[in-house]
């Protein structure tokens, strides 16, 4: 969620969503189990109709990690009225968006019930981690993480068979190059933050089969 101060209209808000989606494997030797897709769009801040449609498209959905580019907390010991007001606005926005997502119990994975008083869909981070909120260094850090995850630094033995046949390594380099050639993503800092936030929240830090990347930006 982008802070209201960065939006051009009081009736709309800009959102970026990164999703880890199961991928149909070609065969048992195919190491890629998931695709990371991103979506960036404006939405109605009252009803979030575009996000609602996206949740239906991505169904079933497990945990939704939610945060904002500005903190919902006041970290200063002597905060100004403006700082308090801004933190309250962000907190209210996160609560409203969380309520919209949590109402979509129909998109929960099959067999996952709803317990009274328990929030199953959203996990709210009231303050975005510094390594993600710092836009000056984010792109470089994300590139480093994805270079490893996509296998671009591999010697070629990405299929796990012990043979340096180069085929999987070539595919890995191609996947990383696809990411590098995504000009929409390169110009969309909010989408980059969403991807980095997903990787951090889901503890995707090694080559566990999260290898493809794709995106839609509006």
Image: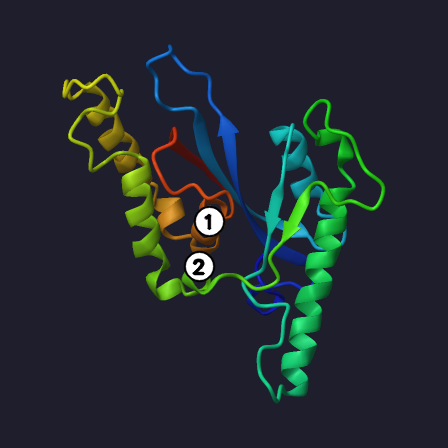
> Up-down: is 2 above or below 41?
below
Q: How many marks?
A: 2
Residue 86, can we see it? yes
**With 40 as the anchor, is 90 left or right in this view?**
right
Q: In percent of the image, x 65 and y 28: which residue is there?
A: 60
**With 90 as the anchor, is 207 left or right in this view?**
left
- Secondary structure category for the residue under label 2: helix
Residue 11, can we see it? no
Q: Quadrant of residue 162?
A: top left
Are the two marked residues, 2 and 1, in contact with CB atoms closer than 8 angstroms?
yes
In the depicted view, which residue is nearer to us: 201 or 11? 201
**With 204 as the anchor, is 153 left or right in this view?**
left
Q: Residue furthest right?
A: 116
Crowd rating for badge 2 (residues with CA inside 10 Å; few <14, some 14–19, many 20+): many
The residue at which mark 2 appears reads as 132
> Which quadrant is the N terminus positioned in?
bottom right
Q: Position of residue 204 (x, y in %)?
A: 43, 41
Q: In percent of the image, x 43 and y 51: which residue is there?
A: 192
Mark-to-mark CA distance, 2 and 1: 9 Å
Q: Which mark is residue 82?
A: none
- Secondary structure category for the residue under label 1: helix
Crowd rating for badge 1 (residues with CA inside 10 Å; few <14, some 14–19, many 20+): few
**In this figure, which colouring scheme has been used for the structure?**
rainbow
In the depicted view, which residue is nearer to us: 133 or 155? 155
Decide which of tag 2 and tag 1 comes sooner along the chain: 2
**With 68 as the anchor, is 165 left or right in this view?**
left
Q: Position of residue 50 (x, y in %)?
A: 66, 42
Q: In percent of the image, x 78 and y 30: which residue is there?
A: 113
In the depicted view, which residue is nearer to us: 101 or 45? 101
Q: Which mark is residue 200?
A: 1
Q: Position of residue 131 (x, y in %)?
A: 41, 61
């Amino acid at each position: 969620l982008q802070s209201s101060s960065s939006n051009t209209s009081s009736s709309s808000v800009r959102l970026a969503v990164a999703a880890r989606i199961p991928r149909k494997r070609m065969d048992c030797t195919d190491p890629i189990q998931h695709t990371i897709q991103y979506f960036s769009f404006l939405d109605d801040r009252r009803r979030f109709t575009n996000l609602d449609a996206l949740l239906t498209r991505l169904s079933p959905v497990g945990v939704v990690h939610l945060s904002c580019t500005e903190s919902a907390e006041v970290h200063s010991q002597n905060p100004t009225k403006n700082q308090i007001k801004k933190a309250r606005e962000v907190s209210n926005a996160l609560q409203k968006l969380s309520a919209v997502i949590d109402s979509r119990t129909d998109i929960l994975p099959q067999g996952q019930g709803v317990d009274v008083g328990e929030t199953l869909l959203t996990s709210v981070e009231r303050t975005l981690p510094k390594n993600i909120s710092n836009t000056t260094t984010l792109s470089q850090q994300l590139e480093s993480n994805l270079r490893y995850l996509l296998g671009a630094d591999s010697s070629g033995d990405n299929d796990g068979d012990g043979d340096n046949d180069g085929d999987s390594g070539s595919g890995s380099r191609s996947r990383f190059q696809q990411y590098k050639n995504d000009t929409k993503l390169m110009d969309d800092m909010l989408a980059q933050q969403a991807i980095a936030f997903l990787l951090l929240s889901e503890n995707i830090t090694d080559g566990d089969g999260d290898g493809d990347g794709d995106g839609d930006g509006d």
